[in-house]
Image: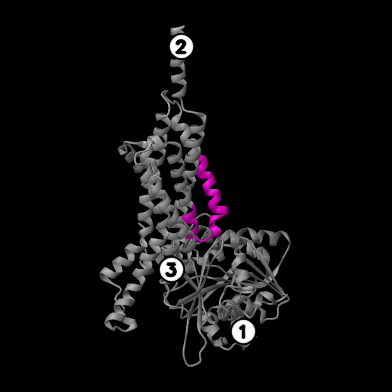
């Protein structure tokens, strides 16, 4: 009887030392959640870095690469943590704090770096054209722009410690060797990362980036709370750590409520003019600035997308007049016009002056178009009135049909419907991202050729012939490869500098000859003249001397993207590691 009781007690001891299904599910669930958080941190920081540096693709690859390497180093460093239970709780508390504050601190440092020259100039009484921007100040500004990568390395190190610590906790809860411990944890990690990616695309892209950071950090904090609750006896200084979690909970609540406005205020320091309205859409960050002028002059309003100037009300008419009027003047008819991009409606306003029967505008960002059609109620009234005046309330014209779709695939639907257009205007952002690069490819232009009437004309905004000469010429060579007869022209737009366009036709005389035969512009304009149009086709004698060595942008080659990145990196001094 005594021997039987001893055997039973021993068996019970063995059973209680096994990893319970509850703890196993709990740990694997925590691992999956943390993997999702880790991936979202990568996307948050790379997205923000791309917005600052203006080179989204390079920022994404650099950030992900740095964080993956840092995670590997963190996995090695985890062996230095003696107590896995306590170490994990401290780790999640730290990750939550750093992850929630990274964007806000970065915005504050960059904003201060941009304001420092003006503060010094104001203190010393220096004129506006003599701001101290070199030396130590320039180095500070440059370093501040790379602060997101510092956060990426720091968070990567900590995230890399999570898997080893969870594995040790899981093993310590069982006297038996867990044969598939690593594989099971990695399985949960991969699944969680996939869910995190889906959450990023489906939800967090549409909300403020600081709010997204605070929400993500809350799950790290929740993991710490659950750990403290479940493994209280195994955690050293559990009461102190619990108090720390409650303090950070308060910080996260504050950041979720006030963080977005604080971040926006810091971001506003990047602009010379006063920021009067900002909005994050699913695809981009929109910022409107206002510059007040005296003597009864109307304010100057500018739109920035992801920190890059899109238009200024003082000279947008120069850009859009050159974009639209030569195109329609070179077209045999103007009944049906297609605009690709141009979600602000400024080019559309100019097109409507030609009295077309129908204008189709294809733009990806429905929120941007809606903003210029029916401004948000929380937008300052003076700004909303100015925007509608700038585009002539064009989106509310019954002749206008708006299609919100990706241009690369959206034109396929127009082709399938058998649509034909007398003129096509391509007003897209510069090819600073591979997704944009394909919209400047020979394949895309061949699609547009199917949509254009034989006696029509097509114009593509083609970046700066001065700052990005190779990219500018490559656009023309790509259009020619697609079967168009191409001419290029340029003019100075004060807000942008020297800017250029490519105009293409399919049959008959080229666009330059068609325009050369005109004696007057069919549309009277307050600024543009026929002489300016004809003169815009003149380039310096040696401008095209190296054209033979410049390659067209074939689909998949990323040729134009590389030309553009090289040119603007040299111009703006960007150095992405």
Query: Which residue is labeled 1 in the image?
Result: 517
Do the residues under discs 3 and 2 have CB atoms within 8 angstroms? no
Label 3: state its secondary structure: helix
Q: Earlier in the sequence, mark 1 or mark 2?
A: 2
Disc 1 crowd rating (10 Å Cα; few below 14, some 14-19, many 20+) is few
Q: Nearer the viewer, mark 1 or mark 3?
A: 3
Label 1: state its secondary structure: loop
In this view of the protein, can residue 67 be seen by the observer?
A: no
In this orientation, which residue lies closer to the viewer: 107 or 467? 107
Q: Earlier in the sequence, mark 3 or mark 2?
A: 2
Q: CA distance from mark 1 to mark 2?
A: 110 Å
Q: CA distance from mark 3 to mark 2?
A: 72 Å
Question: Could you say which quadrant of the image residue 140 lies in?
Answer: bottom left
Q: For the magenta stretch, what is the residue range?
A: 190-215
Q: Is residue 437 left or right of residue 399?
A: left
Prevailing SS of the magenta stretch: helix
**Quadrant assignment for the C terminus:** bottom left
Query: Which residue is labeled 2 in the image?
Result: 5
In this view of the protein, can residue 259 be seen by the observer?
A: yes
Q: Is residue 204 magenta?
A: yes
């Amino acid at each position: 009887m005594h021997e039987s009781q001893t055997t039973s007690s021993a068996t019970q001891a063995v059973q209680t030392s096994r990893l319970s299904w509850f703890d196993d599910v709990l740990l694997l669930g925590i691992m999956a959640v943390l993997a999702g958080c880790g991936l979202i941190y990568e996307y948050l920081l790379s997205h923000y870095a791309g917005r600052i540096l203006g080179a989204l693709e390079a920022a994404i690859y650099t950030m992900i690469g740095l964080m993956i390497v840092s995670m590997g180093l963190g996995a090695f460093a985890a062996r230095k943590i003696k107590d896995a239970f306590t170490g994990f709780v401290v780790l999640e508390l730290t990750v939550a704090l750093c992850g929630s504050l990274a964007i806000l601190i970065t915005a504050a440092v960059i904003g201060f770096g941009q304001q420092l020259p003006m503060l010094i100039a104001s203190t010393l009484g220096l004129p506006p054209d003599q701001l101290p921007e070199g030396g130590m100040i320039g180095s500070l500004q440059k370093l501040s722009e790379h602060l997101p990568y510092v956060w990426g390395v720091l968070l990567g190190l900590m995230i890399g410690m999570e898997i080893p610590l969870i594995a040790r906790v899981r093993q310590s809860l069982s006297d038996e060797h867990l044969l598939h411990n690593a594989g099971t944890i990695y399985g949960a990690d991969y699944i969680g990362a996939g869910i995190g990616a889906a959450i990023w695309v489906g939800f967090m892209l549409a909300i403020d980036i600081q709010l997204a950071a605070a929400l993500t950090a809350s799950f790290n904090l929740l993991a710490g709370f659950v750990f403290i609750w479940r493994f209280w006896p195994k955690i050293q200084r559990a009461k102190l750590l619990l108090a720390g979690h409650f303090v950070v909970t308060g910080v996260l609540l504050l950041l979720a409520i006030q963080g977005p406005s604080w971040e926006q205020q810091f971001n506003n320091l990047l602009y010379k003019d006063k920021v009067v309205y900002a909005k994050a859409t699913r695809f981009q960050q929109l910022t409107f600035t206002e510059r007040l002028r005296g003597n009864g002059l109307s304010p100057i309003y500018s739109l920035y997308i992801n920190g890059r100037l899109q238009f200024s009300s003082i000279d947008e008419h120069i850009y859009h007049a050159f974009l639209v009027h030569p195109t329609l003047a070179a077209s045999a008819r103007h009944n049906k016009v297609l605009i690709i991009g141009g979600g602000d409606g400024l080019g559309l306003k100019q097109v409507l002056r030609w009295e077309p029967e129908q204008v189709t505008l294809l733009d990806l960002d429905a929120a941007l178009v809606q903003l210029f059609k029916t401004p948000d109620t929380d937008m300052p009234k003076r700004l909303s009135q100015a925007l509608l005046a700038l585009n002539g309330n064009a989106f509310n014209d019954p002749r206008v049909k708006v299609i919100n779709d990706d241009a690369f695939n959206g034109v396929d639907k127009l082709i399938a419907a058998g649509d034909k257009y007398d003129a096509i205007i391509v007003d897209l952002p510069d090819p600073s991202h591979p997704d944009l690069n394909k919209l400047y490819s020979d394949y895309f232009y061949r699609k547009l050729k199917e949509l254009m009437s034989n006696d029509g004309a097509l114009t593509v905004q083609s970046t700066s012939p001065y700052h990005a000469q190779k990219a500018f010429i490559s656009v023309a060579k790509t259009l020619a490869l697609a079967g168009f007869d191409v001419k290029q022209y340029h003019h100075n737009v004060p807000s942008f500098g020297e800017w250029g366009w490519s105009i293409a036709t399919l049959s008959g005389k080229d666009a330059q000859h068609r325009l050369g035969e005109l004696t007057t512009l069919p549309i009277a304009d307050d600024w543009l003249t026929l002489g300016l149009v004809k003169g815009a086709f003149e380039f310096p004698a040696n401008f095209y001397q190296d054209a033979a060595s410049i390659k067209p942008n074939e689909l998949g080659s990323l040729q134009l993207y590389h030309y553009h990145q090289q040119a603007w990196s040299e111009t703006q001094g960007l150095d992405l590691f």
